[in-house]
Image (tube, rainbow, N blue to C red):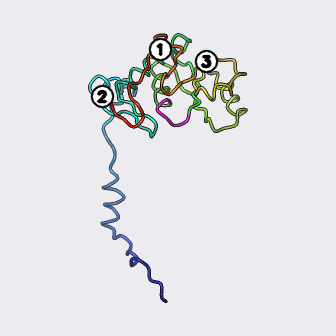
Amino acid sequence: MELRPRSAPRPPLGARERHRVLVEWNRTEADFPHDRMVHDLIAERARERPGALAVATPERILSYGDLDAQANRLAHRLRRLGVGPEARVAVCLPHSTELVVSLLGVLRAGGAYVPIDPGHPRERAELVLKDSGARVLLTLPQLAATFARVEVPVLAIDPWCTLAAANPSGRRWSRSRPGTWPT
């Protein structure tokens, strides 16, 4: 029995088709206001379209309004902890909505973030934290115990009650739920 390929091999792209695929279809440049900061642009979008989708993961979605509100709360908390211009905040979070909220909150507080990969060994994370001179560490509640020996405040970012200690009312800061989108 002779085996045949399912389809004939395709000839290589000609110069014209290759240019179209690699150059024309790949034009992704866009005008970006270089005189404005990213957190200001997000705040502007939140005012214009608060219900528009801002961040989506399989576990959670955030509108621009929710993202803006959570980042503002975190920024105020960070300011109370002394974060401002030239202050560094260590962020040890997986890729998630909490990471986006945290980075935006740090920028709004005027600080700079120092990324720490939660998958790295504890010793490496502690070394980065110490060498960076970070004033605060943001991480998940389940990772907070990993940093029990560090000398900076550790703020645990909970997926549904972000910084519950900074929110005495106990109300959740996100109205969104997994798999749904607020109308």
- Neighbours of disc 3 within 10 Å: few (<14), some (14-19), many (20+): many
Q: Position of residue 171 (x, y in %)?
A: 44, 16
| Residue pointed to by mark 2 | 51
Q: Give the spatial CA distance, label 1 vs label 3.
A: 26 Å
Amino acid type, mark 2:
Gly
| Residue pointed to by mark 1 | 170
- Neighbours of disc 1 within 10 Å: few (<14), some (14-19), many (20+): few
Please report contact status of discs 2 and 3: CB closer than 8 Å, yes or no: no
| Residue pointed to by mark 3 | 135
Q: Which of marks 1 and 2 is nearer the N terminus?
A: 2
Amino acid type, mark 1:
Gly
Q: What count of labels does the image hold?
A: 3
Q: What stretch is highlighted in magenta?
A: 94-98
Q: Where is residue 66 in the image (x, y as percent from the top left)?
A: 38, 24
Please report contact status of discs 1 and 2: CB closer than 8 Å, yes or no: no
SS for callout 3: loop
Q: Give the spatial CA distance, label 1 vs label 2.
A: 23 Å
- Neighbours of disc 2 within 10 Å: few (<14), some (14-19), many (20+): some
Residue furthest out toward the bottom? 1
Amino acid type, mark 3:
Arg
Closer to the observer: label 1 or label 3? 1
The question of residue 97 being in magenta is answered with yes
Please report contact status of discs 1 and 3: CB closer than 8 Å, yes or no: no
The question of residue 163 being in magenta is answered with no
Q: Give the spatial CA distance, label 2 vs label 3.
A: 34 Å
Closer to the observer: label 2 or label 3? 2
